[in-house]
Amino acid sequence: MKTFILLATLSPQGLQTLRFTPERLLEVNREIEDLGGRVLQQWAVLGYYDFISVIEAPDEEAAGNMVAELSARGSATFDTLTVMDPDDLLG
């Protein structure tokens, strides 16, 4: 499994959903698992992004499919970062 960081910005619709149905956040995490990933850590943050999630997925394609599925709902947009061990990068 590879590690990815998802930087999420909620849309106005997503903010409304979270305000009135806060458990929706946990449902999204379960949906990531249903799509073959796993949420390792997650934080709500102040600033440009609303949430930072560290997830595992089999590969970049799987992570991309997860993000595409979540983005298609219109509740959030995502920036996705692939995490690499510095030793692997410096080889």
Image: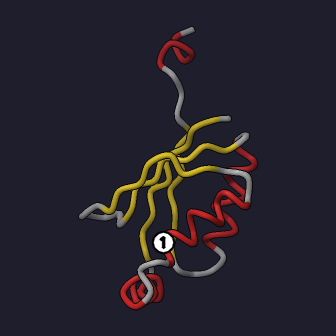
Residue 8 place in picture, x, y as percent: 45, 63
- Residue at the image position 64 percent from the left and 35 percent from the top: 2
Above or below residue 81? Residue 24 is below
Label 1 amino acid? Answer: Leu
Above or below residue 26? Residue 73 is below
| The image quarter in which residue 33 lies | bottom right
| The image quarter in which residue 27 lies | bottom right
> Which residue matches tag 1?
25
Name the image quarter holding the N terminus: top right
Residue 61 place in picture, x, y as percent: 75, 47
**Colour mode?**
secondary structure
Secondary element at tag 1: helix
Q: Count numbered badges in the picture.
A: 1
Most extreme residue toward the top, as rendered?
91
Name the image quarter holding the C terminus: top right
Residue 55 place in picture, x, y as percent: 55, 47
- Residue at the image position 72 percent from the left and 61 percent from the top: 34
Residue 22 place in picture, x, y as percent: 41, 80
Front-most of residues 41 and 47: 41
